[in-house]
């Protein structure tokens, strides 16, 4: 068993990423996220992330069966070299060096306890990551959305905040943590509160809106008419 610990990972924060010119970089998640992973993950957990880096090491140190999906080839080298150098067992780590939008739709794995969305932040990738991962999560599973200060992450966070299947359990600058309270289901647009509240609703559409959405809409839309 490795002597390298989660706290050592946080203290040293190794540079596992690279800039375009090949120089070392560190785009890892915050210390708070690393500690959250250490607290909530473990040998019985099945976990997944889009992107890779310090969070991957944290999941491995927890003993979880972990999947990391990322397009950068160099991450395979930097991650495995770091883990081997520290004597960390990586037998339960699965590195998928493929863009998430290509890998996730046909991914055979499911039953995830924790999922971290921290891959490509350009539209529409975070939404695709959530869509394909959420349907493969266990009820009660934890979803971590990183970089919510970026527009795509902020929209995904706000969308889930008003979906009854998801409960926001913790929110810090740049990262939001949700718990899946009910099985993932496909929804018609008018049953998605965020979509309705950001749409131009015609009077003809109002009778088809569900009660919870009508309750949110009432202050800004007179459903009785004038």
Image (cartoon, rainbow, N blue to C red):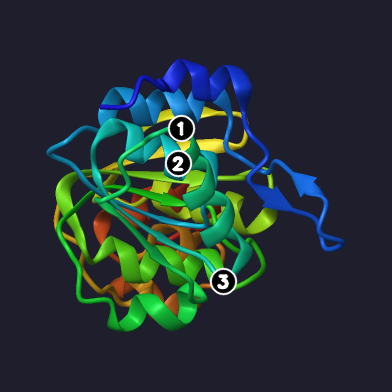
Mark 2 or mark 3, which is nearer the start of the sequence?
3
Question: Residue 14's quadrant in the figure?
Answer: top right
Q: Is mark 1 in CB contact (under 8 Å) with mark 2?
A: yes
Which mark identifies residue 30? none
Question: Residue 192's quadrant in the figure?
Answer: bottom left
Q: Residue at x 40, y 20 (%)?
A: 5
Q: Residue at x 30, y 73 (%)?
A: 207
The answer to whether residue 44 is left or right of residue 191 is: left
Which residue is under mark 1? 86
Say if 58 sits above or below 207 in the image. Answer: above
Of 186 and 200, nearer the camera is 186
Which residue is under mark 2? 83
Q: Secondary structure at mark 2?
A: helix
Q: Residue 41's spot in the image, x, y percent? A: 26, 33
Q: Residues within 10 Å of mark 3 (few under 14, many from 20)?
A: many
The answer to whether residue 86 is left or right of residue 1 is: right
Say if 164 sits above or below 4 in the image. Answer: below
């Amino acid at each position: 068993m490795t002597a390298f610990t989660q706290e050592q990972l946080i203290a040293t924060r190794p540079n596992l990423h690279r800039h375009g010119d090949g120089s070392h970089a560190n785009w890892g998640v915050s210390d708070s996220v690393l500690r959250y992973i250490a607290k909530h993950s473990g040998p019985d957990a099945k976990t997944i992330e889009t992107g890779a880096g310090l969070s991957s090491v944290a999941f491995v140190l927890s003993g979880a069966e972990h999947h990391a999906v990322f397009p950068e080839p160099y991450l395979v080298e930097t991650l495995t070299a770091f883990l081997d150098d520290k004597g960390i067992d990586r037998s339960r780590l699965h590195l998928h060096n493929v863009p998430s939008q290509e890998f996730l739709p046909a991914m055979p794995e499911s039953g995830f306890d924790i999922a971290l969305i921290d891959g490509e932040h350009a539209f529409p990738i975070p939404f695709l990551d959530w869509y394909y991962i959420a349907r493969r999560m266990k009820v009660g599973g934890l979803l971590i959305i990183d970089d919510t200060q970026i527009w795509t992450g902020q929209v995904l966070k706000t969308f889930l905040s008003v979906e009854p299947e998801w409960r926001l359990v913790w929110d810090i600058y740049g990262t939001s943590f949700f718990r899946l309270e009910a099985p993932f289901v496909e929804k018609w647009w008018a049953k998605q509160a965020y979509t309705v509240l950001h749409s131009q609703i015609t009077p003809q559409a109002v009778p088809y809106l569900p009660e919870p959405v009508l309750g949110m809409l009432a202050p800004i839309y007179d459903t009785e008419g004038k």
